[in-house]
Image (cartoon, rainbow, N blue to C red):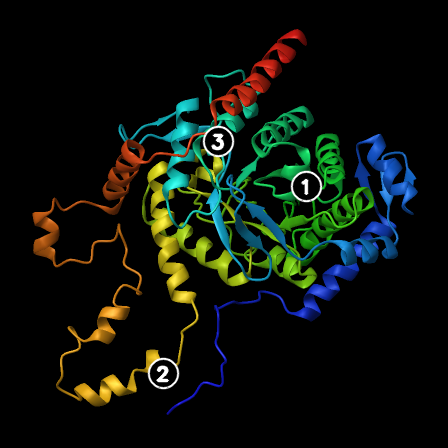
């Protein structure tokens, strides 16, 4: 009998940069931190860094190499996120890939009218319920910035409806530090206290940092706060090559990476061992033809993710997005390439599924199409099990060249294992026409409507719902008092 010596390829992967290139960028980042430094726009953050061995000259903070080495040694290689029920749902690290939506699109491509319009809170609810229902979607983000709530605290309303409309892990974004605190407080109410949420976190904050060499006050405050609580955080400085950093990929990545390392150092000085995820996009040339912050560019693909894999840290990636404005060929190409690229390069927490028009527009049917495409991508990169059962030599010997495998027990045991798309039409032309000659866009729109009509999310207890709503109401009173 043929044997395989117990060796299996679990998944395909690809490295954009090798160890030599990553090492050179790492050393360049250390030189930048030592010779140039990062502008740190928060006094307490500067004090923490200086106490840990850094030098400050006004806003500018310079770090010696040993601080970075020490921080990298204590940063966990994995970030575990749980679902609302307390079950481990995401083991973000290595080549484990988890996908979810994005946040804060300013427009929605309405699949009922075909028109682009401003989103409302009900669209955030619909996006959360859709992501909760789709099996290939692992975590939930808000998708849209609702126009029908107070824009000063829109994130509090987003967080409340996400917590009520999914049991999956949540990645949240807040424009200010107070919003981050309010979101964590809501989670602690659901978990049953701060310690319970710290032990099994089901939400994490995506911290937007101005750039590699500029750390804004809000980002630094969130980093310190979350680290103090022992909560996982996503520290994401992003560079635009040719705009705020060198136009070359290596120079852009080296300066961006300096800011990434500073955030890791700060988090570990506050709480040694707190999990930190690093960026898996940007770090390459900006689109200098249009000066638009595009979401899918060829040259940056896999570059920051290679650095994350070099450090063996969780990577917050980006995929399932397009810069197209319509569900056209460009949309399909960019969505598919980015989904595959993120998986092959080794990003772990991969967001922005369903984003269009450089993140200015979102589409619920596109999220459904991404879910379907992900099923294909995961199937095509999954390791192949080769053992006695799958080789089926006894079945081949039994049936020979002319036997029918359709009714055999072996087929009945395995016929459900291959991937079958729920949106792609694989029928003959005549069958396709008989069924309405629909496009994938139309079928995805119907899937969205069917899910929203039937999918039920396990509700939070009534007292918990009241508790998190009270936080939103408190925040509204507070922000009104500031006017």
Measured as percent of width and height from the top left, residue 336 is found at 40, 54
In the shown orientation, is residue 191 left or right of residue 312?
left
Q: Quadrant of residue 1?
A: bottom left
Q: Distance from label 2 to label 1 (Cα)?
A: 45 Å
Q: Report if the CB atoms under discs 3 and 1 are less than 8 Å apart.
A: no
Residue 207 visible to the viewer: no
Which mark identifies residue 231?
1
Measured as percent of width and height from the top left, residue 197 is found at 63, 38
In the shown orientation, is residue 86 left or right of residue 383?
right
Q: Residue at x 31, y 28 (%)?
A: 115
| Residue 362 position (above or below residue 20) | above
Measured as percent of width and height from the top left, residue 211 is found at 69, 41
Which mark identifies residue 88?
none
10 Å crowding of disc 3: few (<14), some (14-19), many (20+): many
Q: Secondary structure at mark 2?
A: helix
Q: Report if the CB atoms under discs 3 and 2 are less than 8 Å apart.
A: no
Of mark 3 and mark 1, the one earlier in the sequence is 3
Q: Secondary structure at mark 1?
A: loop
Of mark 2 and mark 1, the one earlier in the sequence is 1
Q: Residue at x 18, y 76 (%)?
A: 408
Q: Quadrant of residue 195?
A: top right
For this rendering, which residue is in front, 432 or 239? Answer: 432
| Residue 179 position (above or below residue 271) | above
Q: Secondary structure at mark 3?
A: helix
10 Å crowding of disc 2: few (<14), some (14-19), many (20+): few
Q: Distance from label 3 to label 2 (Cα)?
A: 46 Å
Q: Which residue is mark 3?
A: 162
């Amino acid at each position: 009998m043929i044997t395989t010596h117990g060796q299996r390829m679990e998944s395909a992967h690809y490295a954009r940069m090798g160890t030599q290139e990553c090492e050179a960028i790492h050393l360049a980042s250390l030189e930048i931190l030592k010779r140039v430094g990062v502008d740190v726009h928060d006094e307490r953050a500067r004090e923490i860094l200086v106490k840990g061995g850094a030098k400050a000259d006004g806003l500018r903070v310079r770090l010696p190499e040993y601080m970075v080495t020490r921080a990298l040694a204590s940063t966990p290689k994995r970030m575990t996120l749980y679902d609302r029920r307390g079950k481990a749902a995401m083991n973000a690290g290595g080549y484990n890939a988890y996908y979810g939506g994005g946040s804060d699109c300013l427009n929605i491509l309405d699949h009922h009218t075909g028109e682009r319009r401003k989103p409302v809170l009900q669209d955030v609810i619909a996006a959360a319920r859709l992501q909760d229902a789709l099996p290939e979607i692992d975590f939930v983000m808000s998708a849209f910035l609702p126009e029908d709530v107070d824009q000063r605290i829109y994130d509090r309303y987003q967080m409340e409806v996400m917590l009520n409309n999914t049991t999956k892990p949540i990645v949240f974004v807040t424009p200010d530090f107070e919003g981050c605190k309010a979101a964590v407080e809501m989670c602690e109410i659901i978990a049953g206290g701060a310690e319970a949420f710290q032990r099994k976190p089901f939400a994490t904050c995506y911290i937007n940092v101005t750039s590699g060499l500029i750390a804004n006050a809000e980002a630094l405050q969130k980093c310190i706060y979350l680290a103090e609580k022992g909560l996982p955080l996503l520290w994401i400085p992003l560079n635009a090559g040719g705009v705020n950093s060198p136009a070359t990929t290596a120079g852009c990545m080296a300066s961006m990476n300096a800011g990434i390392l500073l955030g890791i150092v700060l988090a570990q000085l506050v709480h040694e061992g707190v999990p930190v995820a690093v960026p898996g996009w940007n770090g390459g040339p900006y689109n200098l033809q249009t000066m638009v912050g595009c979401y899918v560019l060829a040259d940056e693909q896999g570059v920051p993710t290679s650095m994350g894999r070099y450090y063996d840290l969780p990577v917050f990636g980006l995929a399932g997005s397009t810069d197209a404005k319509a569900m056209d060929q460009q949309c399909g190409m960019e969505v598919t390439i980015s989904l595959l690229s993120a998986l092959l390069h080794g990003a772990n927490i991969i967001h922005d599924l369903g984003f269009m028009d450089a993140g200015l527009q979102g589409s619920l049917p596109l999220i459904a199409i991404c879910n379907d495409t992900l099923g294909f991508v995961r199937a095509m990169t999954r390791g192949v099990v080769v053992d006695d059962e799958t080789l089926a030599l006894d079945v081949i010997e039994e049936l020979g060249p002319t036997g029918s495998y359709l009714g055999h027990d072996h087929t009945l045991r395995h016929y459900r294992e291959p991937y079958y798309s729920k949106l792609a039409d694989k029928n003959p032309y005549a069958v396709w026409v008989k069924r309405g000659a629909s496009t994938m866009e139309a079928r995805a729109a119907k899937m969205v409507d069917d899910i929203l009509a039937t999918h039920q999310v396990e509700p939070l207890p009534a007292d918990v719902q009241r508790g998190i709503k009270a936080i939103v109401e408190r925040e509204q009173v507070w922000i009104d008092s500031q006017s």
